Image (cartoon, helix red, strand yellow):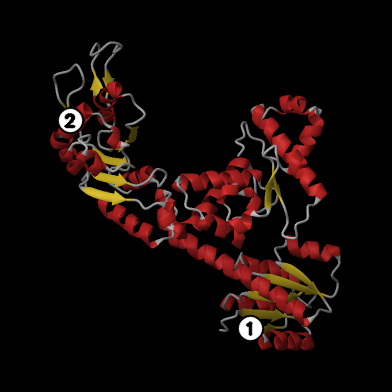
Amino acid sequence: MSRKGSILVVDDEEIMRDVLETILSGAGYKVDLAKTGEEAIKAYEKKPYDVVLMDVSMPGMGGLAALEEILKLDEEAVVLMITAYATFDTAIAAWEKGATGVIRKPFQNEQILNIVSRGIKKRRYEEERRTLRQAMSRFVNRNRIIYRSAVMENILQLVERVAQAKSTVLITGESGTGKELIARAIHESSPRADKPFVAVNCSNIPSELLESELFGHTKGAFTGAVSAKKGLFEVADGGTVFLDEIGDLKPETQVRLLRFLQEREFTPLGDTRPVKVDVRVIAATNTDLKELIRNGNFREDLYYRLAVVPIELPPLRERKEDILPLAQHFIRKYNKENNRNISEHLAPEVLDALEAYDYPGNVRELENIIERAVVIAQTDEITLDCLPVDLLSPDQNKNFKTDKNNIVYYFSSSGQINFYEEVKNFEISLITQALEKTGGNQSHAARLLGLNTTTLNSKIQTYKIPKKKSFEMW
């Protein structure tokens, strides 16, 4: 098979088949021929083609009927219809049935080569996307972890092995790298998966209450303890407790946690009877625990009890191969949440900008950037002006200008401004800000803008501004 691609030409006229074969073979494509729609279907059943060029009007099974059958065999098939009767209705009928494009006879050789080249690129893109999804499906479906990099593949393999054991795990990494996601993956891949997974952020709970939360208390154990309460270790019996920000534990709580890890039992506050539970502990931190040990702020013996199996998550800037699949995942997520249909395909300049950025906030920051882009995109794809200005390179940034009111305008590469486009952008900005200020209440937003509600609603529909209860503007 030609490295450039395989083409199936379907036409009942021999001279047309010969002409197309000569043009395409001369350009390096592998070309097969069929005289009827029935022959085309049989050929496609034997092997899928990168592109099918098919006449609309043929005796027997017509091109549109054959198109439907080919798409049943391969829903991603790239089929280009050729017709001498390229009326608007013919084109619409072909597109509605799933054709990639319609070519009118007579055509220029260059026209055929150009449209076939675009079809090949579309086919390759769909194949790459399918391959990527298949490669990720094992972990995406079970553990909701999106990745493509070798370093994350190694971590997920370690997760699979660790999950079957009872050993304590310490997950380290910068904020936003997905430590809780990895902890959940360990739990969900383990024999404990049907038991509770209890997450505790040690920095969010006041130190004087944290021991009570973890170990429970009896009625009257302290002021305000009006009733007995089970601790989270007891609630999670049989399952997993995830202790996030473990470096923030106070010394007295460190002592009690160490004793629990050694004895697998604890005594609730105000009680004298120990409670024995079967709980796996997974801890996480974005601080350097060894530095805390050197400073006397963290117990060395507790560290070694926690770090039986250490897992270090790399920052996103060190695994940039994951940016594209993560971005596509977040586009799907926020399309669904905002009732939008933004393309998952990212233009080269957009992907370049995303991959060049260092992400101090890691995956969480990337998600925030993509959510914003999906919400404010004015077309069906994410463009450079959907990204935060400080994310762009100097060359990309030169097309942006900020006025004294801090409103950012985008200039085309020619340096010209489309007046009507800028007016539209300004209206969208004003409406979005009004909706943000009013919590999405259109009646209040209309009064704020000096418009009647009908006019505002019409503009929201025209500009496809997402209807959310609240808006976050950058």
**How many numbered marks does the figure carry?**
2
Please state, as top left, top right, bottom left or bottom right, where the N terminus lies in the image: bottom right
Give the crowd class for mark 2: few <14, some 14-19, many >=20 residues within 10 Å. some
Q: Which residue type carries mark 2? A: Val
Vertical comparison of 94 with 217: above or below:
below
Please state, as top left, top right, bottom left or bottom right, where the C terminus lies in the image: top right
Left or right: where 72 falls relative to 208? right
Of badges 2 and 1, the one in the foreground is 2
Q: Which residue type carries mark 1? A: Tyr
- Measured as percent of width and height from the top left, residue 473 is found at 62, 37
Identified at 62% across, 59% down, the residue is: 395
Identified at 60% across, 79% down, the residue is: 5
Mark 2–mark 1 Cα distance, whole angstroms, equals 72 Å
Left or right: where 271 falls relative to 192? left
| Disc 2, SS | helix
| Disc 1, SS | loop
Residue 42: image quadrant is bottom right
- Measured as percent of width and height from the top left, residue 357 is found at 51, 54
Residue where numbered disc 1 is placed = 29
Identified at 59% across, 43% down, the residue is: 372
